[in-house]
Amino acid sequence: MKAARPGKLKRQEDQASFVSWRFALLCGCILLALVGLMLRVAYLQVINPDRLVKEGDMRSLRVQQVPTARGMISDRAGRPLAVSVPVNAIWADPKELNERGGITLDSRWKALSDALEIPLDKLSSRINANPKGRFVYLARQVNPAIGDYIHKLKLPGIYLRQESRRYYPAGQVTSHIIGVTNIDGQGIEGVEKSFDRWLTGQPGERTVRKDRYGRVIEDISSVDSQAAHNLVLSVDERLQALVYRELNNAVAFNKAESGTAVLIDVNTGEVLAMANSPSYNPNNMAGTPKDTMRNRAITDIFEPGSTVKPMVVMTALQHGVVRENSVLNTVPYRINGHEIKDVARYPELSVTGILQKSSNVGVSKLALAMPSSALVDTYSRFGLGKATNLGLVGESSGIYPKNNGGLT
């Protein structure tokens, strides 16, 4: 056997030394990288974790509103005049929907289109109007049965939201008093608008964590909703129906364009009924003319006519112009070229008879026998020219003379 040459042995030793040095350098780099990584992890998770937690929460935490039902409106006997019924809103998450394949030829999409009575191409254009958006309504106030059917289709990116719709049991009989709400449940007419804040509760909140598919995987916290207040009116629904029916008959009989009737308890001043003709159906507003929604009883200005006659007689009695048993000559006469007469000719009438027959002649003679200031004071005390503050939006206070000369 030959002995190894000295030069060859030296080269082998140098090569082994070089490999050991490279291995040590590599191990040192790996060790430094591990130390740096551990320091970075410690910084992110121990020293400054807030930013990472915040970014994670932004991706997974969602705040959901917990709706509360609108308060009920009822008549003086507790009969419901406006109630809230549960319905569903159908909405889509365009970004999630497109990430999971979008609208396809799957029969379930055709079923959704048929259930909502919206063409599939229209649904597609509505969703893709903002393909990276996270929320778009497809339909509002959907019947719960249809909502359950859509939920069972299990379409990606399609969700249901609970909401409520207003229902008015008396329909057009009380529509001008009660009014209506818009699709978001906000009062826009009548008592619904005047007492909107009273009838609206405070919705609650539910904070949840969702996965990438929008499924709730953890309940974080919740804030309870505050129930709305109910509202009881002085109106009697039975009297309201009676007044509405008779008013419609009177309008039809007289071939009038419109009519108004208000029934008041003279002892308390409470409004027991207030009706207008024509009216509208608050449960189906499609095609309803805006003019029909006007509550003529409070918005329209009209001459008071015979309604002021009792005020004139009362003032005459208070000022001693006549007594309860007085009898007046009620033969027609002329003032400034205008003939004052009654529907029928009455030679004379007692004070009671003047009111019973609604005598223009008798009342005008009593009014002319008093200073105009006396009538102005009476009319003012009765509230003429002032708002009644019934709590209805759009009330007109009327036109009233600002000085005595307007009544002479």
Image: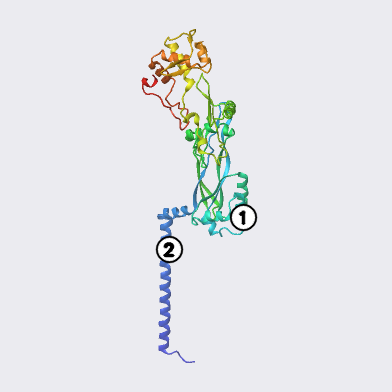
Q: CA distance from mark 2 to mark 1?
A: 53 Å
Residue at the bottom extreme of this rendering: 2
Tell me what residue is drawn at x 43 percent, y 15 percent. 367
Among the 4 quarters of the image, the one containing residue 11: bottom left
Using the image, determine if residue 342 lies above or below residue 22: above
Name the secondary structure under disc 1: helix
Which of marks 1 and 2 precedes in the sequence? 2
**In front of the other: 57 or 360:** 360
Among the 4 quarters of the image, the one containing residue 336: top left
Using the image, determine if residue 265 lies above or below residue 231: above
**In front of the other: 161 or 185:** 185
The 10 Å Cα crowd at callout 2, few under 14, some 14 to 19, many 20 or more, is few
Three-letter amino acid code at the position of disc 2: Leu
Q: Position of residue 141 (x, y in %)?
A: 56, 44
Checking the image for residue 208, the label placed there is none
Number of numbered discs on residues: 2
Three-letter amino acid code at the position of disc 1: Lys
Q: Nearer the viewer, mark 2 or mark 1?
A: 1
Tell me the quarter of the image containing the C terminus: top left
Using the image, determine if residue 43 lies above or below residue 394: below
Name the secondary structure under disc 2: helix
The 10 Å Cα crowd at callout 1, few under 14, some 14 to 19, many 20 or more, is some
Q: Which residue is mark 2?
A: 37
**In front of the other: 373 or 74:** 373
**In front of the other: 59 or 318:** 318
Using the image, determine if residue 138 lies above or below residue 405: below
Q: Does residue 246 show up?
A: yes
**C-beta proximity under 8 Å, tags 2 and 1:** no
Q: Which residue is mark 1?
A: 110
